[in-house]
Amino acid sequence: MSVESLIFEKGTPGRRAATLPAMDVPVATLEDLIPASLLREEPAPLPEVSEIEIVRHYTHLSQRNFGVDTGFYPLGSCTMKYNPKLNEDMAALPGFAHIHPLQPAHTVQGAIQLIYELERYLSEIAGMARTTLQPSAGAHGELTGLMVIKAYHQSNGQGHRNLVLVPDNAHGTNPASATLADYKIVEVKTDPTTGGIEIERFKQVLEQHGPNIAAIMLTNPNTLGLFDTNIAEVGRLIHSVGGQLYYDGANANAVMGITRPGDMGFDVVHFNLHKTCSTPHGGGGPGAGPIGVKAHLIEFLPGPLPAKRGTEYYWEEQGPQSIGKVRANLGNFGVLVRAYTYIRFNGPDGLLHVSESAILNANYLRHELASSYDIAYPLICQHEFVASARRQKEQSGVTATDIAKRLLDFGLYAPTVYFPLIVPEAMMIEPTETETRESLDFFVNVMQQIAEEAESNPDLVKTAPHTTVVGRLDQALAARKPNLRWQPALA
Ligand SMILES: *Cc1c(COP(=O)(O)O)cnc(C)c1O
């Protein structure tokens, strides 16, 4: 056996992590409880381990992982901010953690009150009339929002509108969600100097497709971290052809307390509570993607919505125009409790401070890195910016991937690489507001050192990482044939 498998493979037959007292009441046999046809003939070949073995096993596994609690995590567009431990305490309160989505309303008054109040906070933050907390992620919010828009058009005899406009720097979920909602995508070009919608070309698209346009999906600031100052004009133009303005609000970290999508003219917005309002969400979850809408879209929202009569909270069913439920009443409730806690302890001034600090930190990094790396759009940015390894690739063949891997050697997570697609060798960097000056400076120093290595010793960078548990993986194989499951070595 290899040392690696000796480290990983555990167990000796008959060993146990728990000792249970002998049963002193009559018990049904397994055969009484479960039909014989469903019972195993052989025991499952699971490792049999003692408590200390199992504790060490999982503790070691957790140490091989990277998380925001172990190091700086500048993954652009993902908003990997620190997740306050207070949120976890609140989400674990038994009255929140041990309830069922279909429990009678009078037994879960506190939970409905939390949803009722969180809905009002989010509506206020976004400048929207009402918000549903049902969707489970940003992409799920996008799908829900587009279904609401579709129901709205259908109710106006405009069901033929089958196009959704998406800018060329959009997050990949935007065209994916629109496709899932049975729309066709029309790509809209952005301005190569500002990253915003090119108004003249946008007008041409509207002229060409106007009566068939259902909506345009935008995020502002966009995925380059740049605020589109033409947004009011874009809104006026899309509305003039009968389309709706959809806001991908995953980037609310840059706008909370400063401006509101509703005031910019948007009709629908989704939030990414797991990003903006701090839930640990590495590896794809858990999330919550509430959507807020203007008054003309309320009747199409999924139901039920929380309501209050006197001091009593209850669920109010939606009318016949509703698109129907997209998830159980309480949504992804643990994430909602964390978001509620986050909003309450920050308060309005705190949320403004969050956005201002996120913007300040991103601009600090953008400025400090500008001598070593190309900055794709050298403008004041919002919560993130896109650097490029173009220079390094031309000079020594060192790519954005190589730099991302080399960062791991210093205990730093990599930026988002090769996104947005319109920037070659893109490295999208989002420091978030929770990092200290020291951690930002450390990142800058490491990035500068890597830029020097790319010149003096490119092989060191191209073969990184050197200090991690596993080195460079075959990325295609890891994506196409991931080996995610432990399987017993069968005799
Ligand atoms: C993260 C993100 C999404 C998707 O959100 P999920 O919760 O991962 O589905 C959509 N748009 C933007 C701009 C994002 O950053």
Image (spheres, rainbow, N blue to C red):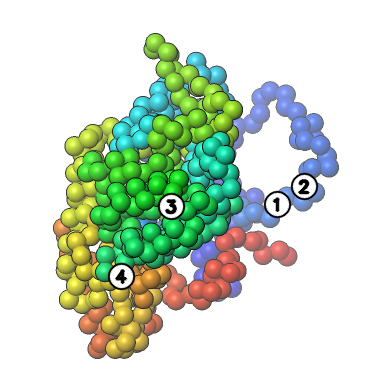
Mark 1 vs mark 4, foreground winner is 4
Rendered view: 174 above or below 443 = above
The amino acid pointed to by label 3 is Ile
Q: CA distance from mark 3 to mark 1?
A: 53 Å
Quadrant of the rendered image containing residue 78: bottom left
Residue 158, image x, y percentages:
55, 43
Secondary element at tag 3: strand
On the rendered structure, is 268 left or right of 158? left
Q: CA distance from mark 2 to mark 3?
A: 54 Å
Rendered view: 251 above or below 451 = above
Front in this rendered view, residue 48 or 219: 219
Q: Residue at x 81, y 37 (%)?
A: 35
Marker disc for residue 192 = 4
Residue 345 visible somewhere in the drawing: yes
Dot 4, crowdedness within 10 Å: few (<14), some or many (≥20)?
Answer: few
Front in this rendered view, residue 20 or 272: 272
The amino acid pointed to by label 1 is Ala
Marker disc for residue 216 = 3
Mark 3 and mark 4 lie on one chain; the one further toward the N terminus is: 4
Q: CA distance from mark 3 to mark 4?
A: 20 Å
The amino acid pointed to by label 4 is Pro
Mark 3 and mark 1 lie on one chain; the one further toward the N terminus is: 1
Q: CA distance from mark 1 to mark 4?
A: 59 Å
Task: Say whether marks 2 and 3 touch (CB < 8 Å).
Answer: no
Question: Which residue position holds label 1?
Answer: 44
Query: As drawn, which residue projects farthest toward the top?
Result: 310
Quadrant of the rendered image containing residue 196: bottom left
> Quadrant of the image for the C terminus?
bottom right
Question: Which residue position holds label 2?
Answer: 40
Q: CA distance from mark 4 to mark 2?
A: 63 Å
